[in-house]
Amino acid sequence: MLNIHGLSGGYGRGLVVDNVSFQVSPGEVLGILGPNGSGKSTLLKLISGVLPKQTGTIEIGGKPADSYTAKEFAREVAVLPQLHAHAFSHTVRATVELGRYPYQTGLFSSWTEEDEAAVSRAMERTGVMRYADTLIESLSGGEQQRVFVAQALAQQAPLLLLDEPTNHLDIAYQQQLLDTVRSLAADEGKTVVSVFHDVNLAALYCDRLLLMQDGKVSVIGAPQDVVKEPIIRSVYKADVVTQPHPELPKPQMTLLPSKPERKEPAYSVDEIQFTVTSDAVVLNTAVPLKTVSSAVHNPGTGWYRTFVNRRVDAAYNADDVKGEMAHYLETEGHHLTDTVGMMTAVHTKDAEIRRYMGDGFSVVIAVTAGVGNAVDASCAAKREVTAGTINTWIFVNGRLSDEAFIQAMITATEAKARALQSERVLDPLTGTQATGTSTDSVLIAAVQTGVQLDYAGPVAPLGKLIGTGVYECTVRAIRTYKEAKGWTS
Amino acid sequence: MRKPLIAYTVSAAVLAAAVWLGVSIGAVHIPISTLWNPGTDQTSATILWNIRMPRVILAGLVGASLAIAGAAFQGLLKNPLADPYTLGVSSGASVGAVMTLFFGISLPFLGLYTLPVFSMIGAAVTMFIVLGFAKLVDRGLNMETIILTGIIFGSFLGSVLSLMIALTGEELRQIIGWLLGSVSMRGWNYVWMIVPFTAIGSFLLWMNRRELNAMLFGEERAKHLGVDVARRKLVILIGGSILTGAAVSVSGTIGFVGLVVPHMTRLLFGSDHRHLLTLSFLNGASLLIICDLLARTIIAPTELPVGVITAFIGAPVFAFIFYRQRKGGNA
């Protein structure tokens, strides 16, 4: 649909766009990205013909762009500009009707049913029909922008050019507008080329991204090939990290604010910071820790500074466990969004909390263990689940990579299974070796300052500490549990 | 445009009323029925046909020309303060006209049309110099640039006018009288003089009513919508210059009409040029007819310059409508 080769142009003598080539097919959404002054808006102006090109070719619909008359061009290409103010006001309908200008011929009104239908369809599609007789200036920015989308749609052009269409819009309107644009490409096969300021929005809504730097194409490709840390860092000169979108296979990036220079003493977790009562094991940390856990309250990944392992009665039964847990935490004066909460039926007084020193880092491990519900995981399908209770907390005073978090979990689980084995805990139902209890929880938390720890497998220094630590603490906790229950080992 | 039919009906009715009052009221009261029933009173019929009617029609045409030109310039420049005069066109027209009077020029093949043609050429030349210079300063042809350039050339042409006035002898009264702006004692000749220019100029502007609507959103946006901006702009500027030149050449510089009528029309009926141009035309005619009526009756038998009256009535009416529209919110 759009075929650009060796395009250069700019204002005055300087080239703002320098030898740019790319193609866009029908039904495709191409996002143009780049830092301020990289020439992305200028590129769009060259394509829309507002700015004359100096060299290169622009083909639209198989014909050179400059072979069209002004009206013919507007039947091929519709442009959605940035939102801006204007001096006099039109009604919404009159504004949308202007989109049919390229179809008007002759001296007198040549308004046809087709024009009317196109205007109505455009207004319905963008949801501005109910404002038809309202003056455009009395609408909010987001609504105004929708009117201009309707105007562009009324042009019924196969190629849509958008210049930062969501600027100054709040997120609901951003979503509506870009959803509309997406569906125009998907359902009607329109070709969309849009300049974006926001890398994340572009990555979410575009099939391909074109990243510009100093007037040239830096990278062009699928979002996951463009929104990469090294690329974004070098083009935008900003410190960013990328991560996948939580729900979609699209990359997203976030800024890393530069840290203040002053040398604070690095905070570290140690065993004396724990508060152990008959009711709970609680740790409050001075800084939020990056945490991965299978807790009841705030499971998954997050940054938390309060960690609660709460003792409940063995007969504990609540319909809404999460709600009851949240209520409990709130009553105890914990801040819900800052807190990770687990449950155990074990006496929390019996918690095993120890610190292990590594080279430049340390690990604090806290375990509460009850093996009344011990289970052989390989036979787990055979039973009903009741409350089981080995809760393992691992606090690392160091900086962990994503894979280190996962390896730490594996190592901890293996060490726990080994502890059960050495304590000869059997699955009472099958008589085989137990590997855990039915609802064990693990929590890995790291201060994310200090030594970088990329691995936590059993051969890495961190893995070794976790392996020994979890094993030792679990063994001790099981023994204490057995003693308390009057079992003999 | 919310209710075009009402707008046209009201404007046409006001114009009819203005014409009726314009021909009836004066030193001698003439019933409107004299129009179709000259009957017994020959004097009344003569006053009506030879004095009042051409005067009313001329006032109407001048008012209409200035108003429609103002509407088009305001839309084109997206500036509510633009009018044919602030752009310097009227000064050019004045220089053209005063030069004709000053040098006593009368070209044989133009005859009666020498003054309006010179005046119009003055207006057009000024317009293109203003635009050419503005383009030299700023390729984007920003409206501020055009207006400032208009002011520069307006002042320069004003000094040329002053120079001619200072040097003039015999023709001083004629020149001053012309400059003050009046439609009195012009007769049918002047009506025939302005008619073709009003018709052509208005037609050129009306042809660009849709383009003006598009250009309200800015030239770039108009281009996106398929408007051949450069050509259309030129046509609109030529149309406006023809109208301004013609109006100034037959009546002198009557202010305020070109600024205020498009505004009142916009406030009352919306800014859709498909209607705004025609409605400004009608209302401009009405306003100047009524102002001229007041100019000749308010301290009769002395006549005031009609330009004084246009501002005198126009400003308060405009203020009222503006206030009501901003406060009422739904006008």
Image: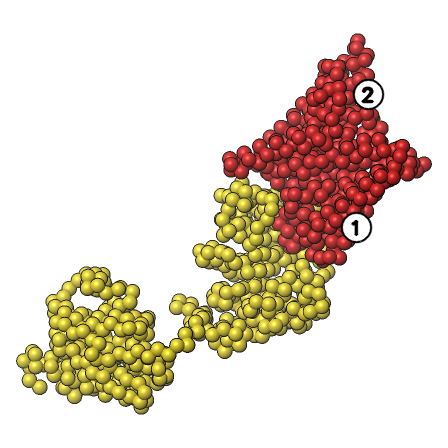
Residue indicated by mark 1: B129
Q: Are marks 1 and 2 on the same chain?
A: yes
Residue closest to the far top: B40
What amino acid is at disc 2?
Asn
Provide the chain ID for the residue under circle 1: B
Q: Is residue B130 visible?
A: yes
Q: A273 or B65, which is in the foreground?
A: A273
Residue indicated by mark 2: B50
In the displayed structure, would residue A168 be above or below residue B183? below
What amino acid is at disc 1?
Ile
For the point 16% across and 74% down, the residue is: A276
Measured as percent of width and height from the top left, residue B23 is found at: 74, 20
Q: Say which chain is red.
A: B
For the point 28% across and 67% down, the residue is: A338
Horizontal side of B203 relative to A193 (left or right) equals right
Q: Secondary structure at mark 1?
A: helix
Q: B280 or A405, which is in the foreground?
A: B280
Chain A's colour is yellow
Q: CA distance from mark 1 to mark 2?
A: 40 Å
Q: A447 or A123, which is in the foreground?
A: A447
Which callout, 1 or 2, points at the residue further toward the start of the chain?
Answer: 2
Measured as percent of width and height from the top left, residue B318 is found at: 61, 34
> Which mark, by number, is residue B114?
none
Location of the N terminus of chain B (image quadrant): top right
Q: How many numbered circles does the render carry?
A: 2
Residue closest to the far left: A486
Q: Quadrant of residue B25?
A: top right
In the displayed structure, would residue A23 be above or below residue B136? below
Horizontal side of B26 relative to A466 (left or right) equals right
For the point 65% across and 32% down, the residue is: B314
For the point 49% across and 52% down, the residue is: A142
